[in-house]
Image (cartoon, rainbow, N blue to C red):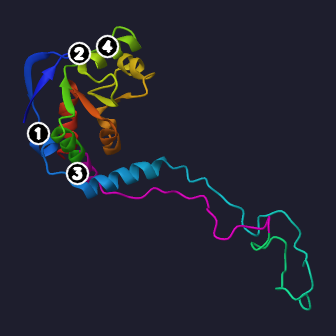
Amino acid sequence: MEVKVLDINGKDTGRKVQLSDSVFGIEPNNHAVYLDVKQYLANQRQGTHKAKERAEVAGSTRKIKKQKGTGTARAGSKKSPLFKGGGTVFGPRPRSYSFKLNKTVKRLARKSAFSIKVKESNLVVVEDFNFETPNTKNFINVLKALGLENKKSLFVLGESNKNVYLSSRNLKASSVVINSELSTYEILNANNLVLLEGSLEGIEENLSK
């Protein structure tokens, strides 16, 4: 499919780029997308939650009352889960939430995410640009020109560009990544996807393996 290339002023440059149908025009696989997003979010979890169990609670292990003749249930320790201040039964323990996902499934998920953005007309291609120095105002002007000032957007660069990255860092609704760092979650989490012309070759090469 052909997509027109815009400049940083939001105007048509008169040029078009050919997007690979095998990457940007497939039938989205929702289950692959679900698995990849689930893995991404699982990897963000620290897994440091912990509740003290019976053996870890501070307190005496002395038998708190005699075994028989009290008219109530027998009890051996104040650290029992039945008592206030006692240990927690089956409480959370530190663990990793990460799980394995095949590379082919991850590639399919990213292709599906790109195809969804194309179908929703939320993907634009912009010619490569740079700033002389980091300047948030310049980046805001680019957002205004593209009509993305009040929308969550993701800019994808072909290679690392410190000035562009630093210019966007103070903006909560916009983020900048290079094509090798893209994830399905980031693509779908953005309302609009802005691909710089120089990133297309790397994206298609990575997802065509």
Q: In this view, does 80 lie to the left or right of 200?
A: right
Q: Are circles 3 and 1 on residues that touch, CB within 8 Å?
A: no
The label on residue 20 is 1
Q: Is residue 96 part of the magenta span, yes or no? A: yes
Labels 4 and 1: the sequence-earlier one: 1
Labels 2 and 4: the sequence-earlier one: 2
Labels 3 and 2: the sequence-earlier one: 2
Choose mark 4 or mark 1, whichever is in front.
Answer: 4
- Magenta stretch bounds: 84-110
Q: How crowded is mark 1: few (under 14 residues within 10 Å), some or many (20 or more)?
A: some
Q: In this view, does 180 lie to the left or right of 73?
A: left
Q: Position of residue 142 (x, y in %)?
A: 29, 16
Q: Which amino acid does label 2 sit on?
A: Ile
**Which residue is disc 2 drawn over?**
8
For mark 1, give the secondary structure.
loop
Q: Which residue is drawn at 63% across and 70% down?
A: 90
For mark 2, give the secondary structure.
loop
